[in-house]
Image (cartoon, rainbow, N blue to C red):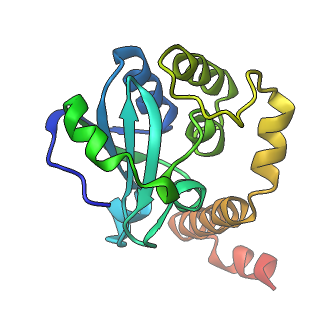
Amino acid sequence: MKVPRGRLLRSRVVSNPATAFSSVLDDSLTGYLVFEPQDTLLLDDQGRGVMTVRNGVPVLVYHTGTDRGGADGLADLAVPGPYKVDVFELSDEEIERIHDADELRVRPGEPAERVAGAPNLADRTRSRAREHGLLPDDVADVSTNEDAVVSFLSDEERIEAIKRQAREDAKRQATEWGLNDEFAEVDR
């Protein structure tokens, strides 16, 4: 996805992407966000998530490391934080030029549910999408916490990424605390 260079509004590290999602929704931002998960920050891994927004509502998602977009790109972004988030503003005309990429499209509440685990924020986002005519016809007006849980549990890639990160964190802490021998027994 080729995105025009926008005006940088802010750059910060957040522990949960819900912070960034809520901020752009509250600001009714039209532009895009660039997410760099901790693996990219700490391990110099390749891959950033780019999410475009119109009036604060997510429209397109693309992951540069996997070259996947839409729901698949969200799955690639759904890793444990923290995230470095850069927020850029674009004009309505600039954002319209890139919003015809249907293969990168996401449902308005999907990033809040799948990446941030924030069903209330997803509901607020869908409400804003309805106000601005950005809600696809096949999206229900109401989302339940049960739907968010089912969606999360069915996302095997995200669950595996969380497990992998937890194992790596546990091994690192075991090394820091001098518990390598005890941890090795658990690994067997």
Describe residue 113's horizontal placement relative to residue 57 as left or right. Answer: right
Residue 157 position, x and y percent, is: 68, 66
Count of numbered tags: 0
Does 186 sit above or below residue 20?
A: below
At a point 67% along the width and 33% down the height, the residue shown is: 137
Describe residue 39's horizontal placement relative to residue 117 as left or right. Answer: left
The quarter of the rendered structure image containing the N terminus is bottom left
At a point 38% along the width and 35% down the height, the residue shown is: 53
Does 132 sit above or below residue 46?
A: above
Residue 118 position, x and y percent, is: 64, 30
Which image quadrant for residue 167? bottom right
At a point 39% along the width and 50% down the height, the residue shown is: 100
The quarter of the rendered structure image containing the C terminus is bottom right
| Front-lying residue, 155 or 180 | 155
Residue 39 position, x and y percent, is: 43, 64
Q: Residue furthest bottom?
A: 188
| Front-lying residue, 95 or 58 | 95
| Front-lying residue, 100 or 165 | 100
